[in-house]
Image (tube, rainbow, N blue to C red):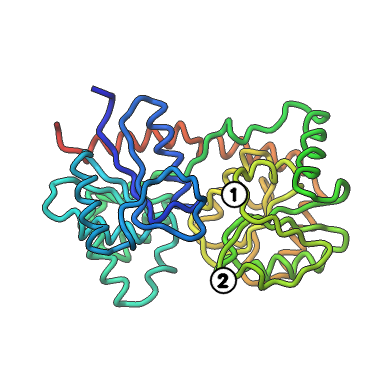
Amino acid sequence: MADGPRVLHLITDPRGRGAQNLARDLHAELLRRGAPSVLRALQPHADAPPEHDAPVLGPSRHHPATLRALRAAARQADVVVAHGSSTLQACAVGLLGTGVPFVYVNIGDPRHWTASLSRRLRVGAFLHRAAAVSAISDGARTVLLERFRLPARKVRTIPNGRAADAYRPAAGPAEREAERRGAREELGLPPQGPVVAWIGALAPEKRLDLALAAIDRLPGVHLAVAGDGPLGGSFPLTDRVHFLGRLADPGVLYRAADALLLTSDSEGVPGVLIEAALAELPAVATDVGWVGDVVLDGRTGALVRPGDPAALAEALGRVLAGDRAALGAAARAHALARFDLAVVTDSWQHLLSQVTPAR
């Protein structure tokens, strides 16, 4: 028998978003370790790549056919890991009576996505059905315990994680400069001058408008935007802003850029910040959610109050003019110690073995 419980990772849809990316990384690492793991999506999505790795269970998130397919898939597993708020309701309802436990992965800020009382009560009822809840930060764990009155034993802190080797920077200055030139040429970015990366969904809460306003205050600085979403095509085009669409591998942009900019109104612990840190790319980010777990102000980048383009521009200018190599090296060291996927998966395997009934 393969080592460990049989795990079903459940995602909302096959797109490459935060919850989905963590699920894919955990799934791949479990398989690499010889542990049985499968990945499924509740529903299709028009923005998902045609060739994706997550077979779809049904026509929509909570359709009866979807929930029936979820029950059938769960009976082939020992435990289900629910990634994303839509999967929480699906598991809480769809797994009733199956005897298969589920673990919910909370990657966002629950204060943001359960703002109304009705939603807070509904989500709380679903969370109490879970065998365990994973919080990506001690701060998030505290919020979950207080907001939903969950038992302390049920909520565990397991950080977001990324595979360190996938974002390893080149060994020396000459090699890095060659990588930088090659990456800029591949992406169609200017060969000279500072380039700032912005990676995320083109959605209202990500606040690309703040990034554009900040860059407008920094003459000579270019912004490379990677992502797609509902606001795509609604931003003004300028010669210093480059819309790249969704990148299959964001690593090429980390190699091309001098800094990463994150401007969200709400976040948990964003994977993009971990990836940039592992690539030794300093970040300027709004101080929301638990972004400060990754970006250490003044040591690996800069934190700025949300909603202030002038403050973002000032912090970004300071980082670009400073010792980016030292900031980047500190960022990678911090990410290796806390967010390396190998360490994160160890914690996951321990949790899953605890909540899985003996076979």
Q: Nearer the viewer, mark 2 or mark 1?
A: 2
> Helix, strand or loop at disc 1?
helix
Residue at 61% in and 53% down: 246
The residue where tag 2 is placed is 204
Q: Residue furthest bottom?
A: 117
Q: Is residue 37 above or below residue 199?
A: above
Find residue 273 and name its label: 1
Q: Measuring from the top left, give residue 149's x and y in whole percent.
A: 25, 63
Q: Quadrant of the C terminus?
A: top left
* Left or right: where 229 falls relative to 43: right
The type of residue carrying mark 1 is Leu
Q: Measuring from the top left, give residue 139's x and y in whole percent.
A: 43, 55
Q: Measuring from the top left, give residue 183's x and y in whole percent.
A: 76, 41
Q: Foreground: 159 or 323?
A: 159
Q: Measuring from the top left, give residue 92's x and y in whole percent.
A: 22, 58
> Helix, strand or loop at disc 2?
helix
Residue at 13% in and 49% down: 98
Q: Residues within 10 Å of mark 1 (few under 14, many from 20)?
A: many
